[in-house]
Image (cartoon, rainbow, N blue to C red):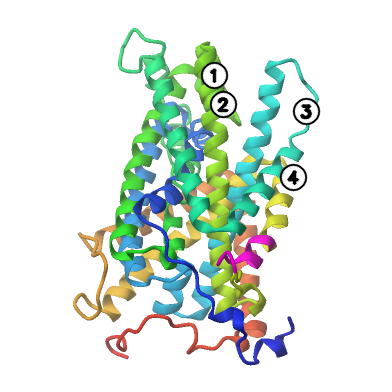
Amino acid sequence: MTDKKETEVKGKEDRISLLKVLGPAHVWALGVGIVLVGEYMGYNFSIGKGGALGSIIACWFIGLLYTCVAMIDSEVTSTVAAAGGQYSQAKHIIGPLMAFNVGLYLVFAYTMLEAADALVVGDLMVEAARDFGITDLDPKPFVVFTIAILAWLNYRGVYMTLTINFVITAIAFIAIFVLFFAAQGWSPGGAIHQKGLLTDLPYGWLGVIAAFQFAIWYYLGIEGTCQAAEEVRSVARSLPLGTMTGMMTLLIAATMTWYCTAGLVPWEYLGVSFIPQYDAARAFGNPFVSVVMFIGTLFSAVASANGTINDAARAWFSMGRDRFLPKWFGAVHPKYRTPYRSILFLVPVAISFGFTGLLDQVITFSILSGLLGYTFMPINMFKFRKQWPLGSIRRGYVHPFHPFPAVTLFILCAITYFATYLGYGVQLLAMMTFYIAASIWFHFFRYKYVRRGDQFQMNWPRPKGY
């Protein structure tokens, strides 16, 4: 659609809204489903950076970072109940340029995560085939099939998509407990070697800081619960409940994952594995547990990819609906009530990154995009409380201890930038250059098509001091 046509009268497709069909369990399934794959792969690169002990220290500090993210998001999103999550927050509270950048952060964080998930499915199939003597299996068809079938599922409807996500996420979560109980993790005489857990810091405290980067993978994506705000039946109840219970679930799962895998596999090998949970099960030597961890790894990757397609498409759809991108992307399917054009558009992007086969690089790009979004949140929170103080508008949830969560989040984000620079400085600079170039493009070539009045969906009073 040409830019000239974009300025014409809105078509029928603009009057079709997304369905409000989701409850707290769906929000939990969306948040945990996206993230739980981080308990099956990617987190272990933090062990390679800081050793086993350094990894769990980083895990808990980054857990604090994400607890702050969940608290802030629960307040703002239960008040700004619109698709797009943090993007919608930015356009209402800060302004168009920030909103455009935050929208890109979300899309690239989720799309890169989707590509990483598909890579894990391919690598898992290759490793399983090797166990049966098949050594020439190509992972790329599995990458394409995973993304294509999940895109079709998202195309057909959000309720079915997230209901399936709830089931397979629950199975993947239970699989973590199967490994723990099979290895008798509570017993000093069990299969888990405590000496492998309490290692020295091989690279000192600088290694612990470096581990912050990949410790993000334990939790990256929990903020995706905000993307479903426009499709949740009771935003004030479902979003805070689903997000905070999801965060508690992930803190438990992350700690148990580290305990089991680092206690079964030497940290030097674990730190470079693409499928650490499956490798830990094979090291344990129980065929049943190996099958369970194969299923858990597969289901966690599929659930994550399923959720990221949902979230990335809704961020892209919201930007199109507000004319931050061509209006063509803001269409809703007349039958399935899904942002179908945005879903289909992002499929080849995810497949192309999945074809690279560079799991740590793809993860790094996802982490950096997510980290930029988290850095925006403290600024957003301070402006939100200042412009609309408590009592001036109805909030679905009010997070406690402000401003400490916002300050803590900003400090931990700064430390994680430094951690990323230590190992992936070139990628960090490349991503910053890309987002600066995108901002310039938006300012000079796209902003003229944005209708400022149309982008505001909340009937709020003028901000204090306006």
Horizontally, residue 329 falls left or right of residue 418, namely right
Name the quadrant containing residue 328: bottom right
Q: Secondary structure at mark 4?
A: loop
Dot 4: within a 10 Å radius of its alpha carbon, few (fewer than 14), some, or many (20 or more) residues? some
Determine the CA span between mark 3 and mark 2: 17 Å
**Quadrant of the rendering where the C terminus is positioned:** bottom left
Q: Are marks 2 and 1 in contact (CB under 8 Å)?
A: yes
Q: Earlier in the sequence, mark 4 or mark 3?
A: 3
Q: Amino acid at mark 1?
A: Ser
Q: Which residues are magenta?
A: 335-344
Q: Amino acid at mark 4?
A: Phe
Q: Earlier in the sequence, mark 3 or mark 2?
A: 3
Judging depth in this view, the residue of 88 and 310 nearest the camera is 310
The residue that mark 1 highlights is 290
Determine the CA span between mark 2 and mark 1: 6 Å
Residue 396 lies, in percent from the top left, at 27, 67
Determine the CA span between mark 4 and mark 3: 15 Å
Q: Are marks 3 and 1 in contact (CB under 8 Å)?
A: no
Determine the CA span between mark 3 and mark 1: 20 Å
Q: Secondary structure at mark 3?
A: loop
- The residue that appears at 38% across and 29% down in the rendered structure is 256
Q: Earlier in the sequence, mark 4 or mark 2?
A: 2
- The residue that appears at 51% across and 68% down in the rendered structure is 102
> What number is the disc on residue 294?
2
Residue 223 lies, in percent from the top left, at 42, 56
- The residue that appears at 42% across and 37% down in the rendered structure is 170
Q: Earlier in the sequence, mark 3 or mark 1?
A: 3
Name the quadrant containing residue 73: bottom left
The residue that mark 3 highlights is 137
The residue that mark 4 highlights is 355
Q: Amino acid at mark 2?
A: Phe
Residue 219 lies, in percent from the top left, at 43, 45
